[in-house]
Amino acid sequence: MNFDRAWKLHDEAAHRLARGPGRVFTPRDTAIRLAQLTLDPLAEAPTVLDPACGAGALLLGALEWASVERPSWLAHWLRGAMSGWDVDAENAVACTELIGVVAGELGMQAGVVASARDGLAATGEYDVVLANPPWISYSGRHANELPRQRRTELAARFPAFAGWPALHTAFSEQCARLTRRDGGRLGLILPMQMADLAGYGAARRAITSRLTLEHSIELGENLFPGVTEPAGLFVFGAGSGTERPWLPDEDAALMARVRRFAPLPPESFGDVGVHTGNAADLLVGREGNGLPLRIGRDIEPFRLAEPTQILRNVELPEGRYARVAGEARYREAIIVLRQTASRPIAARHEPWAYFRNSVLACYGAEGHDPDFLLGVLNSDVVARIHRAMFRDARQRTFPQLKISHLRALPVPGREVGELYEGIASASRAVQACRGDVAALNALVEQVYLE
């Protein structure tokens, strides 16, 4: 069967019915992908529910996937084993009409598939739950209004909501409750930050107290019209887990291999750069008398440019403030790293100079060769590890390398044997402009991944 007509009708209905905060409709390819990951492990036709069905995209995606992969399931679903709920009666009608069109194309007849129902207040148990719940937050800078009584009620009923007041946190927990515990499967489309933001820990715990995460897939920004927040696709199966971050599939595999290495001691890194406070005009300049002062843009991988600014020695008047560490904190830094970056970008701190807070310091670690550390920090595999561990490093605008990131990065030691000196030697060669960065990257990858 060709589903093009059904999707055209869906898109028309979605455009007509789109209203209110948090209401977006799932694109066709995303709906089919969610269906495939959630449904494919099942051998028997399941009961399926979308408790926030909108115009029916996720149910339509499941039908299209099954028409190719499990055609025998279609009759079972269209005879009552597929359900949708929506608080908006017009959406429920549109969903039922859409599934009716599919049934007609198949020479079948579908009953009332969707009903006007508040998914948060409903009960039941289903083999499979698919949902793209409304993304509405009731906290933070862009918080939506919610009556105090309703907020109290949701917090009492849903620990996920109590941890982070949002409609999608309450809905996610409710979806887990609606999923059959013995062998049920859950597929959700949610803000990607739910995967690892600390504030969402209660939501992750509420879901994985009943189910186990199987897939975490980053869908990127602009998946939905007018929504710039990155989206994620999350699939859960039988079992229970923890509130630990839901790493994307490829990141989880990477982290499982590199966590055997411990981070460097916390004192190996420092955030000591000159913070000009409200006195930048008095302290910093590009010419004149003063001490050489570097900024983040003076650092490239393995290369350190001459300081481009100066730090003036002035007495700050009352009402002006700044922070400048003691000279030794700058002089003793053996490596400096650019702070505004999506990955570590490091260079030997030679010759030393003062630096602004757009630069972070590495003071080395006992038993470590600075050239080894420099080679590791600048490597492509550490860039991957950094982006896997810290989602804020992935943002396109103003990415940041934080001191907490550096203190958490796993770093191999001399236990890796001959490869340790091989990396240090390759790093020295690159710094001397006679080495191959690709060869250095290969050595570091071998240490981490083999």
Image: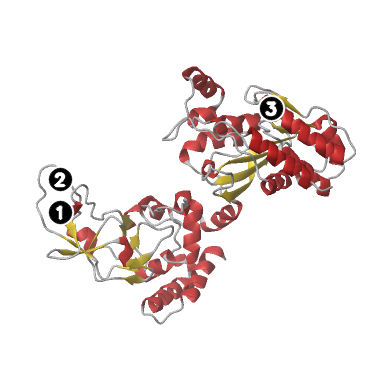
For the residue pair 115 and 349, the one nearer the viewer reads as 115
| Amino acid carrying mark 1 in the image | Leu
C-alpha separation, residue under disc 1 versus residue under disc 2: 9 Å
At mark 2, the secondary structure is: loop
Q: Residues within 10 Å of mark 1 (few under 14, many from 20)?
A: some
* Whether label 1 touches label 2, CB < 8 Å: yes
Query: On the picture, is 387 further left or further right than 298?
Result: right
C-alpha separation, residue under disc 2 versus residue under disc 3: 60 Å
Q: Measuring 69% from the left and 27% from the top, which residue is drawn there?
A: 90
Q: Residues within 10 Å of mark 3 (few under 14, many from 20)?
A: some
| Amino acid carrying mark 3 in the image | Glu
* Whether label 3 touches label 1, CB < 8 Å: no
Percent position of residue 368, x then y: 37, 66
* Residue that numbered label 2 is attached to: 320
* Residue that numbered label 3 is attached to: 90
* Residue that numbered label 1 is attached to: 282
Percent position of residue 428, x then y: 38, 76
Percent position of residue 450, x then y: 57, 66
Which label lies toward us, 3 or 1? Answer: 3
| Amino acid carrying mark 2 in the image | Arg
At mark 3, the secondary structure is: helix
Q: Residues within 10 Å of mark 2 (few under 14, many from 20)?
A: few
